[in-house]
Image (tube, helix red, strand yellow):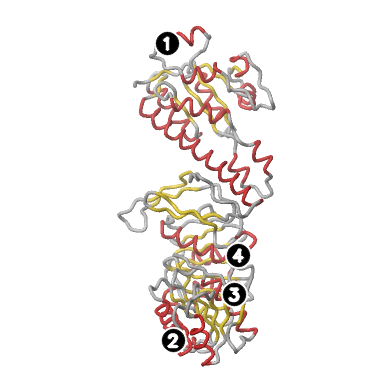
Amino acid sequence: MSDRKIQRALLSVSDKQGLEPFARMLAQSGVELLATGGTFKLLRDGGIAVREVSEHTGFPEMMDGRVKTLHPKIHGGLLALRDEPAHLRAMEEHRIAPIDLVAVNLYPFEETVAREGIDRAEAIENIDIGGPSMVRSAAKNHRFVTVVTDPADYGRVLAELEERGGATSEGLRRELAQKAFALTARYDAAIARFLFEEERRVSPALDFPPSFSLAGVRARGLRYGENSHQRAALYLTGERGPSAARAEVVGEGKELSYNNFVDLDSALALALEFSEPFVCVLKHNNPCGAALAPTIAEALAAAWAGDPLSAFGSVLGFTRPVDRASADFLVSENRFVEAILAPSFDEDALERLRTGAKWGKNARFLACGPIGPAQRAVAALEVKPLRGGFLLQDRDLAVGGEARLEVMTKTQPTSEQLASLLFANKVCKHVKSNAIVLATGTRVLGVGAGQMSRVDSVRLALSKAGAASQGSVMASDAFFPFPDGVEAAIDGGVRAVLQPGGSMRDKDVIAACDRRGVPMAFTGTRHFRH
């Protein structure tokens, strides 16, 4: 391959950012311009010499614009090999002029389906057919054709045309072709996923599809991955609802890291469980503190008290805007945090954090809009990568104890214990398994996470709670295989237990609680998180 001079270009874009100056420079360089519909009108009204595609093909647009570029004079002009005599003869015989550059971006399908209340019919109308076809034709023939799908690349193309006497280089064409195929792959994946999720909304029991594509667009490179020797980047999908990945970074701060995003996503997932004022403190992808309270500042103070040592350098999730009282709490004793995710930040709170805390200028503050159960169910699929494949599952939107709760012991829990157990269970489903959460009221006292045996998680939670474990309640993400876990908890001061049940030794575990007069309830819903 070599440099290819641009003589004719086809422009057909829905995102018209930067298009007019790009087209004007092409025209001034002697490039003949073809355009469709709204693109043609914009350029014509801007005084730029341009021909409408229908004039070029001799065939009118029809069917509300559904058919306009699907024509041999378009695709023949894109796909013809300029060094193949048979192709040149066909072009001459059928009067097909070569098209050397295509600037196309597609109907905004992902943006359309991300809107609240979008219906299937409108989504279908925003599936682009002609655009992807042109992009693929041009990208396939990138030996001869330059394909531009991103307005950010207009400047690079113009720079090469100026440097190379109206031609583009092989290297640029190869790079843009790869980018074009990535675009069409992502576009088709978004359509397939939307249609699948639409069908599942109608028929929840529908099986997973025989083929499932993952696609995203790179939002930014990251300094490194989990460790400094690992490379990393952040990609965005069209998933709807609040997101750490798409949240607005408020003010200035250090660049968000890979680990920040992982922790912020976990903080958001936990915060989405609660409609009340709630704060969670995340460290290494596990909550070390969490609390509900009448005000968000009170919830913050109670959540921080759950494990003040671990809270140092943590990530926080709020269900309410961060207010001045919350900022004062963090600044007052230099309670260092890496990042905060919240619906929004009050101006005086942001100023207090930025100027009052030693770490304030480096911390990351992210606003993601409303957070609560209403937003939790927006996206119901999650993916876990494997070497050579990936796992796809429904997101764990159930909450053990809400649909079913059965007291298994002779002693009944009090209403206060029951409320506290249900709170602890919501937190427990977001703790790495084996997971144990101790709570009093609506405040977490101690967490046992990621231990290989459940009794070790109990002991860890008790050690974190310390003397506060006296009179506490305990939630477990899965059943107790032996009585030792509940026995250790009761010895440590736990006075009510919640678990899914389902062990072969459930009777032994129930008997251990009965001997000590401690109530225990089963939910029937396990919440493993690996």
Residue 435 x, y percent position in the rendering: 46, 73
Amino acid at dot 1: Ala
| Residue at mark 4 to residue at mark 3: CA–CA distance | 14 Å
* 4 vs 3, front mark: 3
User: Which amino acid type is marked by label 2?
Assistant: Ala
Q: Which residue is mark 2?
A: 488
- The residue tagged 3 is 292
Q: Residue at x 46, y 87 (%)?
A: 487
Residue 250 appears in the figure: no
Q: Return the x and y of residue 341 as percentages of the image width and height.
A: 53, 62
Q: Looking at the image, is mark 1 or mark 4 earlier in the sequence?
A: 1
- Earlier in the chain: of badge 1 and badge 3, it is 1
300 versus 471 height, above or below: above
Helix, strand or loop at label 1? It is helix
- Residue at the spot of label 1: 86
Dot 2 falls on a residue whose secondary structure is helix
Q: Nearer the viewer, residue 138 or 311?
A: 138
Is the Cβ of the residue at disc 1 closer than 8 Å to that at disc 4? no
